[in-house]
Image (cartoon, rainbow, N blue to C red):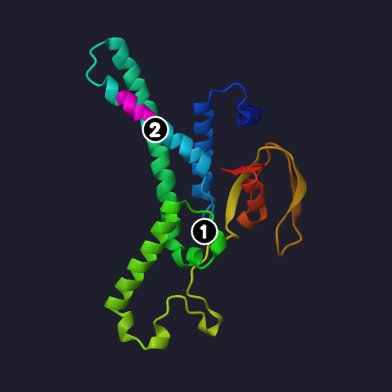
C-alpha cells in the first residue's frame, strides 16, 4: 500500500458511518497529541462516538450470560471494538486535559479559546484554576506583599501566563492540493503543498490548513 492508497481512504466513499467516525476520531486524536495548542472540541463527532459507545455497552450487557457459542463470539468482537473506541476517547480527553492544566490562565484570559472547549472542559478549567489559586494562597502567596500575589503578573514586560509554542515544529501531510502557498512567518520561506506531500514545518504556518481539513498532523 502506497501513499495514494492511504489518502484514498480519506474520502471515505462507500464506508459505513461507524468506520468513518473511527477514522475521524483517530485523526482528531493524532492531531490533538501533535499540536502544541488546544484544538476545537469536535462536538458532532464526540456526540456520535459517545452515543455509539453507550449503545455497544447496552448490547454487551444484554448478551452477557448467553451460552450460545456464536453469540459469545460476536460478543467478543463487539467488546474488542468497544475497547478500541474507549481507548481512543480516553487518550484524546487526557491529552486535552493536560493542555488545559498547562495553559489554564491563557485559556481563561482569552475568550476566543473558550469556544475550543466543551462545556465540561470549560467548567473544569475554571474549577482547576480556582483550586490552584486557593492552594497557592494558603501555602505561600499570602506571605508575599499584595503586589506580588498575582498569578497573571506582566511586570517588567515578562508575562507569568504560559502560552503554547505555536512555532513548534510538526509533521504535516496534505490531504488535498492546497491552492494558497504556505508561508512561514518571519522568514522568506513559502511553498505549495500538494496531495500526499509531507513536511516538517512550524505549527503556526500550517494551522489554518489543518483546521480546515486540508492537511493532517502525523
Q: Position of residue 45 (x, y in %)?
A: 51, 38
Q: Main secondary structure of the magenta part?
A: helix
Magenta stretch contains residue 59: yes
Question: Residue furthest toward the bottom?
Answer: 145
Whether residue 184 is situated above or below residue 30 in the rendered picture: below
Q: Whole-percent x and y of residue 8?
A: 64, 28
Is 81 on the left-hand or right-hand side of 71? right
Q: Is residue 29 magenta?
A: no
- In this view, the residue in front, 18 or 76, is 18
Query: What's the magenta region?
Result: 55-60
Crowd band around label 2 with a 10 angstrom C-alpha radius: few (<14), some (14–19), many (20+): some
The quarter of the displayed image where residue 190 is located: bottom right
| Pointer 2 residue | 53
Residue that carries the numbered disc 1 in the rendered image: 114
Residue located 54% across and 50% down the image:
40
Secondary structure, mark 2, is helix
Above or below, comparing residue 12 to residue 38 in the picture: above
Residue 165 in view (yes/no):
no
Q: Secondary structure at mark 1?
A: helix
- For marks 2 and 1, the one nearer the N-term is 2
Total labels drawn: 2
Q: Residue, x 27% and y 11% (percent of image)?
A: 69
Looking at the image, residue 198 sits to the left or right of residue 52; the answer is right
Q: In the figure, residue 20 lies in which quadrant?
A: top right
Left or right, 29 with reference to 64: right
Quadrant of the snapshot with the N terminus: top right
The CA span between labels 2 and 1 is: 27 Å
Q: Determine the residue positioned at 45% across, 35% down.
A: 49
> Residue 218's x, y, as percent?
56, 43
Is residue 76 shown left or right of residue 4?
A: left
Amino acid at each position: 500500500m502506497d501513499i495514494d492508497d492511504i489518502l484514498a481512504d480519506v474520502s471515505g466513499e462507500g464506508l459505513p458511518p461507524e468506520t468513518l467516525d473511527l477514522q475521524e476520531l483517530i485523526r482528531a486524536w493524532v492531531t490533538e497529541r501533535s499540536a502544541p495548542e488546544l484544538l476545537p472540541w469536535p462536538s458532532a463527532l464526540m456526540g456520535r462516538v459517545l452515543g455509539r459507545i453507550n449503545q455497544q455497552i447496552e448490547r454487551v450487557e444484554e448478551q452477557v450470560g448467553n451460552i450460545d457459542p456464536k453469540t459469545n463470539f460476536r460478543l467478543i468482537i463487539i467488546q474488542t471494538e468497544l475497547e478500541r473506541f474507549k481507548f481512543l476517547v480516553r487518550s484524546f480527553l487526557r491529552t486535552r486535559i493536560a493542555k488545559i492544566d498547562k495553559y489554564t490562565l491563557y485559556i481563561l484570559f482569552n475568550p476566543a479559546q473558550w469556544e475550543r472547549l466543551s462545556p465540561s472542559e470549560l467548567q473544569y478549567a475554571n474549577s482547576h484554576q480556582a483550586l490552584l489559586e486557593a492552594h497557592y494562597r494558603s501555602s505561600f502567596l499570602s506571605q508575599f506583599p499584595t503586589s506580588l500575589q498575582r498569578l497573571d503578573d506582566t511586570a517588567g514586560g515578562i508575562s507569568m501566563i504560559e502560552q503554547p509554542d505555536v512555532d513548534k515544529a510538526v509533521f504535516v501531510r496534505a490531504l488535498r492540493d492546497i491552492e494558497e502557498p504556505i508561508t512561514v512567518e518571519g522568514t522568506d520561506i513559502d511553498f505549495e503543498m500538494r496531495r500526499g506531500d509531507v513536511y516538517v514545518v512550524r505549527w503556526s504556518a500550517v494551522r489554518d490548513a489543518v483546521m480546515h481539513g486540508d492537511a493532517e498532523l502525523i
